Amino acid sequence: MTQTLRQRIWKTARWFIALFFLMLIFRLIYGYLITPTTYDNDYANYFSGVEHLRKNYASENQMKVSNAQNASFATDQKYEKTATVRSKSSQFDKDVDHIKNLTTQFQGLIQYEQNTGNKGSREIHWLIGINPAKFDSFYLQVQQIGQVKSMAITKVDKTNEYRQLNAKKASLEKNLASLNELKSRSGAISDYVTLHDKILEIETQLQELGVELGNFNTENEFCTVRFSLYEGAPEQKISFLRRCKVALEWTIKYYAILIFSLLGLVVTLFILLLAIDKLKVMNKLNE
C-alpha cells in the first residue's frame, strides 16, 4: 500500500517537473527569437515633423499616355524615393565627419540638419538629397556607418501629380490671358479694381505653382536619404548564462502562480463537494 502511494506521488510529481522544464525551455527559445524593438520605436516618427521641407523628385522611363482624343504623347515617370536609416555609434564625431565626407564624395546636398543632446547622448538627423543614379550606392555606403538599427526604402509614384500641376498651370495661364485682355476694354473703376485683384490672385497662384513644379525640374532631381545617428556604446550580445538566469526567474515566478492557482482551484472544488454532500445529508434528515 505504501509503495503504491509512493509510486502515485512520484508519477504526479514527474508531470509537474516536466511542466517546469517545458516552461523553462519555452522561455529560452522565446528570448532567442524575440528581439527588443524599444530603440526603433522611440525614434520612428522623428521625420514626421519636418514634412514641410522641400520635396525631392526624380524621373525615369518614357511612358505612353493617351488623352481624351486617343492621341499619344510621351512623358517621364516622376517618383519620390526615400531611404530611412537609423544608426548608433560609439565614435560619434568620427562618424559625423564620415557621413559629411560621403555626401561630398557622392555630390549630395544636405538639405536639413539638426543636432540635439549633450556629449554621451547626442543625436544628429540629416535629410540628404542624392542624385538618383548614385542613390543605391550611397544607401549601401551609409549602412556601413555605426551599428544600423533600422533601414527602409519607400518609392511613391508622382506622375499623376506632375500632370495635374501642369494642367492647373495651363488653366491659370489661360485665365490670366483672358483677364489681361479685359483690361484693354472700358468700364467702371470698381470693375478695374476687382479685375486687378483677380489678376494678382492668379499671378500669386502661378508663382506658388512654379515653386512646386520647380521641384520636378531635371536639374533639381534628387532622391532623399533620411539618416539619424545616435551616440552610445555598441550593444553587447546577451550571454547564454544571462539568458538562463532570466528564463529561470521567469519560470519560477509563473510556475509558482500556476501551482497556487491550481491549488486554489482544487481547494475550492473540495469545499463545494463537501457543501453538496452536507446538503444531501440534511435533505435525508429532513425526509
Image (tube, helix red, strand yellow):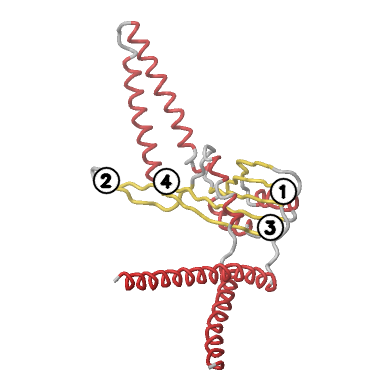
User: Is label 4 or label 2 in front?
Assistant: 4
At label 1, counting other C-alpha atoms closer than 10 Å, the crowd grade (few under 14, some 14-19, many 20 or more) is: few
- The mark that comes first in sequence, 1 or 2, is 2
Residue occupying image coordinates x 30% and y 8%: 186
Disc number for residue 158: 4
**Residues under numbered marks 3 and 1 in contact, where contact means CB atoms less than 8 Å apart:** no
What is the spatial separation of the Cα atoms under label 4 and label 1, in whole angstroms? 38 Å
At label 2, counting other C-alpha atoms closer than 10 Å, the crowd grade (few under 14, some 14-19, many 20 or more) is: few
Disc 3 residue type? Gly
Instruction: Please determine whether, in this image, residue 286 is positioned above or below residue 186.
Output: below
Which element carries disc 3, helix, strand or loop? loop
Q: Residue 112 in the image: x percent, y percent?
A: 61, 41
- The mark that comes first in sequence, 4 or 1, is 1
Q: Which residue is mark 1?
A: 121
Can you say which quadrant of the picture contains the C terminus?
bottom left
Which element carries disc 2, helix, strand or loop? loop
User: Is label 4 or label 3 in front?
Assistant: 3
User: Is label 1 or label 2 in front?
Assistant: 1
Disc 2 residue type? Ala
Q: Residue 215 in the image: x percent, y percent?
A: 49, 39
Disc number for residue 146: 3
**Residues under numbered marks 4 and 3 in contact, where contact means CB atoms less than 8 Å apart:** no
Q: Residue 22, located in which quarter of the rendered image?
A: bottom right
- The mark that comes first in sequence, 4 or 2, is 2
Instruction: Please determine whether, in this image, residue 221 is positioned above or below residue 205.
Output: below
